[in-house]
Every structure is written in C-alpha cells, then in structure tokens.
Amino acid sequence: MEFRMQADLPHPPERVWPVMVDIARIASCIPGCEQVEERERLADYSAVMKQKIGPFKLEVPAQITVEEHQEPSLVRARASGMDKFTRTTLGVTLKVTLVPVDGGACQLAVEADLQVAGRLASLGHSMIKKRAEENFAEFERRFLAELEAI
C-alpha cells in the first residue's frame, strides 16, 4: 500500500531539519511509536510500534535503517518487524523530503510503501489503509505542533 502526505510548513528546510533528525522528537509525533533506541545516529534504530486495527492489537518490535540522508532536504529509511502474537509482519519504506517554497517556508512530503502479511492482512486493504491515513493525519498534527516550538 502506498501513502502520500504533504504539508506546508512555515519554516525553511534548515529550521525543520533539526526536528526531523531529533529521533525523540520525531518519534513522539508517530502514533504508537515507543521504546525508540538510537544505535547509530542517522543510520540504525529500533522501536516498538503499537496499534489497534480492527480486532487486532499489534506490538511490533521494528528495526529501522536510514538508507540515505541529505541535509537539509531528504531522509530515506526502511523499517520491518513482526508481531509475536498474530505473526503479522510489517515492512515500510519511507521517503521524507523538504522542498523550499517562496517566503522562507517549505513543503514536507512523505511517501511510504507499507507491506503487511499475516493475520492482519486478512482484514483487507481498506481497513488497514484507513488506519494508516488516520496515523498520518495525527503525525502531521503533532509534527506541526513540534515546529511551533522552534
């Protein structure tokens, strides 16, 4: 499943970048993201994703690898993990870009490709997509609130 999100931000990329790469701050913007551990800055992380989707409660320990970053405009990452109870596997590739726009602002663009296999996949595309869209909307709200603090 592919997802795209865009948001206009009131700051230039150079001011937004430090928030994007502050793992504690960005993790607090992601619904259900807990126990984030930085193993190597801008390279290797672990986290636990907790979500309730339909009748399933998932707790997915995830390994996150930053595959590419170009300050102050691009982060490309990959994450994967498996819920022990449902044996559901999740994999996501993520591309986040900051593009300058007129007036000293920028546009945040998020592209994600989510792969789901196992019991959760039996719920169907529409229920999983709906939950992911809700999570993206909540991420945007939280991220914009973090930016107000800079």
Image (spheres, helix red, strand yellow):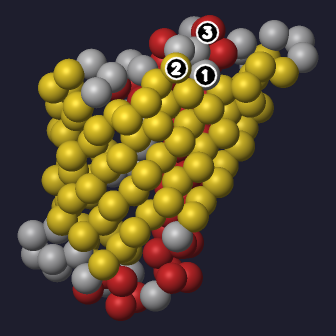
Q: Secondary structure at mark 1?
A: loop
Neighbour tally class for label 3: few under 14, some 14-19, many 20 plus, Cα within 10 Å: some
Could you say where residue 22 lies in the image, as x and y percent from the top left?
38, 19
Residue at left offset 56%, top offset 27%: 74
Labels 3 and 1: the sequence-earlier one: 3
Q: Position of residue 80 (x, y in %)?
A: 27, 56
Return the disc, 3 or 2, that comes first in the chain's sequence. 3
Please tell me which residue is depicted at 67% across the width and 33% down the height of the picture: 108
Q: Amino acid at mark 3?
A: Arg
Q: Dot 3 corresponds to which residue?
A: 15
Marks 2,1: beta carbons within 8 A: yes
Check the image and name the residue furthest to the left.
84
Residue 149 x, y percent position in the rendering: 56, 13
Residue 100's spot in the image, x, y percent?
77, 19
Q: Amino acid at mark 1?
A: Ser
**Residue shown at the point (66%, 26%) measured from the top left:** 98
Q: Secondary structure at mark 3?
A: helix
**Residue hosting label 1:** 73
Above or below residue 20? Residue 18 is above
Residue with the mark numbered 2: 70
Q: Amino acid at mark 2?
A: Gln
Identify the residue shown where x is 73% and y is 25%.
99
Label 3 to label 1: alpha-carbon separation: 11 Å
Number of other residues with Cα within 10 Å of mark 1, as a class: few under 14, some 14 to 19, many 20 or more: some
Left or right placement of residue 141 versus residue 21 in this view: right
Q: Secondary structure at mark 2?
A: strand
Report the side of 99 relative to 134 (left or right): right
Residue 106 lies, with reference to residue 44, above or below; the image says above
- Residue 18, disc: none
Is any atom of residue 140 visible in this view? yes
